[in-house]
Amino acid sequence: MLEKAGVLVYNDPLNITTHSKLIIIDNYITVIGSTNWSYSALMKNNESSVIISSSEVAEHYEEYFDMIRDNQE
């Protein structure tokens, strides 16, 4: 669904699990935390996430995920 909407999506290889829950919006807003993006997590669970408005933080996490992706290719 995300890919069909034009969102870049990366999946882990089957032998590796990245457990980071992270969204970067417009190279400025970073959402990071324990929240799974499911109905139960959002409506029933006690989860913890933060929204950070910072281009520096967004750039850091983009570099982090680029490094993970590059190491898996």
Image (cartoon, rainbow, N blue to C red):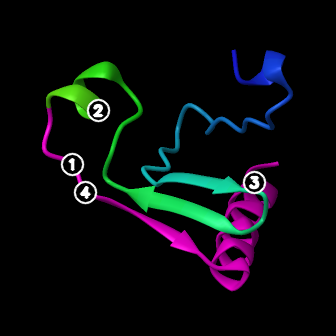
As measured in the structure, the alpha-carbon distance from the residue carrying label 4 to the one carrying label 3 is 26 Å
Mark 2 packing: few (<14 Cα in 10 Å), some, or many (20+)? few
Q: Amino acid at mark 2?
A: Leu
Specify start and end residues of the magenta stretch as a single range: 45-73
Residue ID for mark 4: 48
From the viewer's perspective, is 63 left or right of 29?
right
- Callouts 1 and 3 close, C-beta under 8 Å: no
> Which is nearer the N-term, disc 1 or disc 2?
2
Is 14 magenta? The answer is no
- Callouts 4 and 1 close, C-beta under 8 Å: yes
The numbered disc on residue 37 is: none
The numbered disc on residue 69 is: 3
Which mark is nearer the camera, 4 or 3?
A: 4
The numbered disc on residue 47 is: 1
**Residue 1 percent location from the top left of the image:** 69, 14
Which element type, helix, strand or loop, lies under badge 1?
loop
**Residue 36 percent location from the top left of the image:** 36, 37
Which element type, helix, strand or loop, lies under badge 3?
helix
> Which is nearer the N-term, disc 4 or disc 3?
4
Query: Image point 79% across, 23% down: which residue?
Result: 3
